[in-house]
Amino acid sequence: MRTHKTAILLFAFLAWIPGSTLLAYSDYSGTGTSSSPADNTPVNNTRYPIQAWFTPSDDIGTKVGAMIDKAEESVWIASPNIDLPELSLAVVGAKGRKLDIRIILDNGSKGSGQGDGPLFSNNGIPVFYSPGAMQAGLMHYSFVIIDSKTLILGSFQWDQEDEAQNYENVVKISDPDTVKTYTNAFLKLWQQQ
């Protein structure tokens, strides 16, 4: 039930974002505009479909990795940490295709020996560790922006534990106003380097 409530709150939040044109949300009760989360059907929004995925069953890393593999311009990621091979390999591959790759991670993951920050840096991918010199744990953003057109966000934090064990969720959104809102939030943090 917690996952369903999280999805409802996430959709309600997105509907509240100033400038957002989110047209529909799902309550998964059978009375809303979508069916149950088990079949992962897009919310019935004819302008900008919204799709939701849930762990541990939906293999989010592979799905998002495949979207990154198809990216043509850019991949920007903000997350406390990244430790998900399917995602990390897709990001390194996107850098090899000369895409604009930018990653913001929590300051606490720097030098911790955990996560793929060093993998990205060693492959020429700019990694910015969130501000707050000695304060770890301040980064709670958890989203990916692909080609300035697709936004993937939710409680999922792009690591193996979330993929295999936790009950997490993400939604894929292509509404231009919502993507722009998150792009601006990303850039505001990115400019603090």
Image (tube, rainbow, N blue to C red):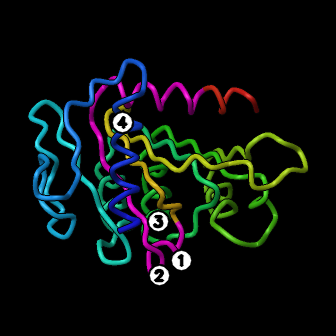
Frontmost of labels 4 and 3 is: 4
Report the disc number at residue 161: 1
How dense is the environment of label 1, judged by Cα within 10 Å: few (below 14), some, or many (20 and up)?
some
Give the image location of residue 132, x and y in percent.
84, 42
* Residue on which disc 4 sits: 147
User: Which tag, 2 or 4, sits closer to the chain's start?
Assistant: 4
Q: Which stretch appears magenta?
A: 159-187
Q: Amino acid at mark 1?
A: Glu
Residue in the picture at 74% in, 29% down: 192
Are the two marked residues, 3 and 1, in contact with CB atoms closer than 8 angstroms? no
Report the disc number at residue 25: none
Are the two marked residues, 4 and 3, in contact with CB atoms closer than 8 angstroms? no
Does 19 sit left or right of 46 as displayed? right
Measure the C-alpha gap from mark 1 to mark 4: 27 Å
Residue 169: in magenta span: yes
Residue in the picture at 26% in, 30% down: 22
Task: State the SS at label 4.
Answer: loop
| Res. 181 image quadrant | top left
Residue in the picture at 43% in, 53% down: 154
Measure the C-alpha gap from mark 1 to mark 2: 5 Å
Measure the C-alpha gap from mark 3 to mark 2: 21 Å
Q: Amino acid at mark 3?
A: Leu
Farthest residue to the top: give it: 19
Q: Amino acid at mark 2?
A: Gln
| In the foreground, 82 or 31 | 31
Report the disc number at residue 165: 2
Q: Amino acid at mark 4?
A: Asp
Frontmost of labels 3 and 1 is: 1
Are the two marked residues, 1 and 2, in contact with CB atoms closer than 8 angstroms? yes
How dense is the environment of label 4, judged by Cα within 10 Å: few (below 14), some, or many (20 and up)?
some
Report the disc number at residue 89: 3
Give the image location of residue 122, x and y in percent.
67, 59
